[in-house]
Amino acid sequence: MNKSELEMLIVRLAVHYQVLSKEKVAEAVRQWRNQPGGGEFGVFLVEQGYITEAVLRKLEMARGQYLEKNRPQTTSAGASSAPQPASSAANESANTVDESANTTASPPVVEAEPEPAAAVVDDPGWKLRFDPATTLEDLLCQAQELQASDLHLHSGAPLKVRLQGRLETASATIDRARAEELVYGLLSDEQRDLLDEHRQLDFSFAIADVGRFRANAFWQQRGLDAVFRTIPLEPPTLAELGLPDSFKELVSFHQGIVLLTGPAGCGKSSTMAALVRLINEQRPDHIITVEDPIEYVHPSARCVVNQRQVGPHTESFARALRAALREDPDIIVIGELRDLETVSLALTAAETGHLVLATLHTSNAIRTINRILGVFPPDQQAQIRMMFSESLRSVVSQRLLPRRDGVGRAAAIEILNNTKAVSNLIREQKTFQLHSVMQTGAQYGMCLLDHSLADLVKRRIISKEAAGAEAEKPEAFRE
């Protein structure tokens, strides 16, 4: 290639990798051609502030890769066959704006096109460094450094990271082949077979000295996707989560059921892990967890901790819970109450002298009570209400809201503790009156979500707007 062709290759790569829009490139080309003395187009882009020097180096690296892959090949007759330019316009010095725009309209057509995003690693608007050599483990390490709660890998779409509850674009578009390469490169042979068979897969894994990740891989119309939740190597403490000391009372029980609830992504798993860690540090007991998949790993301290994962270690939550009742546990931790059989076995375990900790996807404490009771058929309701009213110890519902200072998120907590009044209302099918009991039950450690939100606003930890978005009565937080 001559000099003009090399410069036009930088033009095409800048558009292909979405470093600049076609309009911006056309504008830059016009200015570059009008300046006296010529000069290199890439250097001009840096001097005029279109890109940084680091991005230029990536563009030049991509150009070198393209030239290397398309170097002249020797034919059988001994002649050299050079790669032909994608269009004659790429090799001519266009004198009009239209020609400049047309020159940048499409990436170079090559036999082996360089991977997208290689040239835009350092784009200031993107969160992750990503090039053809990047592995999924590299991306997860970067996500952990950003303190992202989730990493999204979608075929035909950019990488996304969830930062403080907001999903943000983190890279250029990932094509289907690259997405499959990244995901399958992380899986074992057995996991690949399961993904191919069921078209989706729940799994977890750890990266040494970085953290653990809960993942789900699934097929969709554009190709293979995967979402990864970051999990620290060590279970958190209540203080690290910003939870009140009163939560320590939740692990003082030796029998009964404690429910941790809230919508997806509200920190239920972290709160559960903090409670298990507290028990593990304080009590000489036997803890059995049933999870799908295992998230936080709890090494045995004062307790003996056995963690089982649905799939590799047991067929289902229900089968694991039935077996757990014969394994002499003191504490049973259930990753999620999903169905009638699991709920029934959890209540049985709580009634027969075990402390059960479980999570549930519900929006507040009262709806949690109704959800538990509602999974049972009408002919069992009276018996279940009696059983649940006696075995329930506490329901904790939580939300995570962005802090006013922009650093992290704060937890708003709703707590319903079982008292004689609460137990009577559950038995008598008057759960609609629990709101009043919670409103006046501060002396028993109870708190409504709206009261917790109001306290966070008063302490200037969160804004009124953020509180109103999560409140049961948002009008109370309007100006």
Image: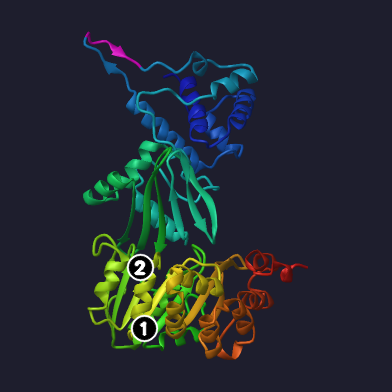
Amino acid type, label 2: Glu
Q: Residue furthest top?
A: 77
Instruction: Report the span colored magenta.
Output: 77-82
Q: Residue at x 27, y 60 (%)?
A: 311
Magenta highlight: main SS = loop
Magenta segment includes 378: no
Give the residue type that dot 1 points to. Glu
Q: CA distance from mark 2 to mark 1?
A: 15 Å
Disc 1 crowd rating (10 Å Cα; few below 14, some 14-19, many 20+) is some
Q: Position of residue 198 (x, y in %)?
A: 31, 47
Quick one: quadrant of the N terminus?
top left
Q: Tag on residue 341? A: 2
Where residue 456 sits, quadrant-wise, is: bottom right
Where disc 2 sits, the SS reads helix
Q: Is residue 218 left or right of residue 51?
A: left
Report the disc number at residue 196: none
Q: Which mark is residue 351?
A: 1
Observer-nearest of 376 and 217: 376
Q: Determine whether, in the image, residue 363 is placed left or right of residue 80.
A: right
> Which residue: 58% across, 67% down?
401
The answer to which quarter of the image holds residue 58 is top left
